[in-house]
Image: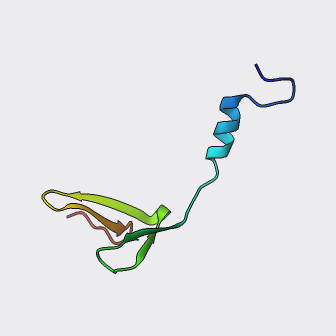
Amino acid sequence: MPKKGELSKTARASLANREQVNHLTARVCEQCGERIMLAELQPVKVVGTGMKYYHKNHFQTA
């Protein structure tokens, strides 16, 4: 039980998760060849090939 004026463990964890982490990943976009920021990463599973990575605005579904 938290003391008066303190947040519970769950509330503290919830506040910590609000912070959006966005950093440059090691993944390279298959279409443009540039590294992808975490917020823009669109992983796509290709049957027989494995995973391909795209910027969200570069990946088009047919």
Q: Position of residue 56 (x, y in %)?
A: 38, 66
Q: Is residue 3 above or below residue 55?
A: above
The x, y position of residue 18, in whole percent, is: 63, 48
Looking at the image, what colour scheme do you see? Answer: rainbow
Vertical position of residue 17 compared to residue 60: above or below: above
* Quarter-of-image position of residue 15: top right
**Viewport quadrant of the C terminus:** bottom left
Above or below, comparing residue 11 to residue 37 in the picture: above
Q: Residue furthest left?
A: 48
Residue at the far top: name it.
1
Q: How many marks?
A: 0
Question: What residue is rendered at 55% in x and 62% in y?
Answer: 22
Task: Report whether 56 appears left or right of 3.
Answer: left
- Report whether 11 appears left or right of 29: right
| The N terminus lies in quadrant | top right
Q: Position of residue 17 (x, y in %)?
A: 61, 45
- Kindly indicate the quadrant of the structure image that contains residue 60: bottom left
- Residue shown at the point (16%, 62%) measured from the top left: 49
Q: Residue at the location (86% across, 29% down)?
A: 5
Asked whether 13 or 58 is in front, the reply is 13
Q: Residue at x 48, y 63 (%)?
A: 38
Give the farthest residue toward the front.
26
Q: Is residue 4 left or right of residue 32?
A: right
